[in-house]
Image (cartoon, rainbow, N blue to C red):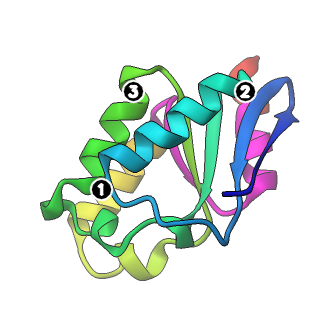
Amino acid sequence: MSQTVQDLDGTPVLLCAADGPPLAGEQDALDLIGQALGTGAHWVAVPADRLAPEFFRLRTRVAGEVVQKFATYRLGLAVLGDVSRHTATGTALADFVRECNEGRQIWFVPDLAALRDRLARTAR
């Protein structure tokens, strides 16, 4: 798995490669969290295409498990990319994404530039 740590406006972020294994559950989240903690990152940025399809079906509870692990370890999780094809299929996921984006720890953003801007605004 190819990851790099990049400083985004003063915040160390573990950037996950687009071609890595899917983030499909609690153990995958713990693996990323361990890597982030080992590098001193405060955030993990995962391309939306790396999320398992089950993540986007809230009834599977995969999203809840992943989000809860990041919250427990007080690490931010940014999902990078367009998730509109998933949110268009129902209101529950759209509400989940909106609520995450209103918070300070889990964000769905279109790209790395948007994450950088968001981190810059929250640091002030």
Q: Within 10 Å of the Cα at label 3, are there few (<14), some (14-19), or many (20+) other Cα atoms?
A: some
Rendering coords of residue 39 (x, y %)? 72, 27
Asked if residue 103 shows in the view, the reply is: yes
Q: In this view, does 26 lie to the left or right of 120?
A: left
Instruction: Specify the label residue 95 is tagged with.
Output: 1
The one of 29 and 58 positioned closer to us in this rendering: 29
| Spatial CA span between label 1 and label 2 | 32 Å
The kind of secondary structure element at disc 2 is helix
Q: Is residue 28 above or below residue 89?
A: above
User: As shown in the figure, which amino acid type bears the numbered disc 1?
Assistant: Asp
Mark 1 or mark 2: which comes first in sequence?
2
Rendering coords of residue 12 (x, y %)? 77, 28
Q: Is residue 15 above or below residue 68?
A: below
The kind of secondary structure element at disc 1 is helix
Residue at (66, 57) in percent of width and height: 1
Instruction: Specify the label residue 122 is tagged with.
Output: none
Residue at (26, 55) in percent of width and height: 62
The kind of secondary structure element at disc 3 is helix
The one of 115 and 49 positioned closer to us in this rendering: 49
Instruction: Report which residue position mark 2 lands on.
Output: 39
Of tags 3 and 1, which is closer to the observer? 3
Residue at (49, 71) in percent of width and height: 83
Instruction: Report which residue position mark 3 lands on.
Output: 71
Q: In this view, does 32 lie above or below 103?
A: below
Q: Does the magenta stretch include residue 19?
A: no
Stretch in magenta: 102-119
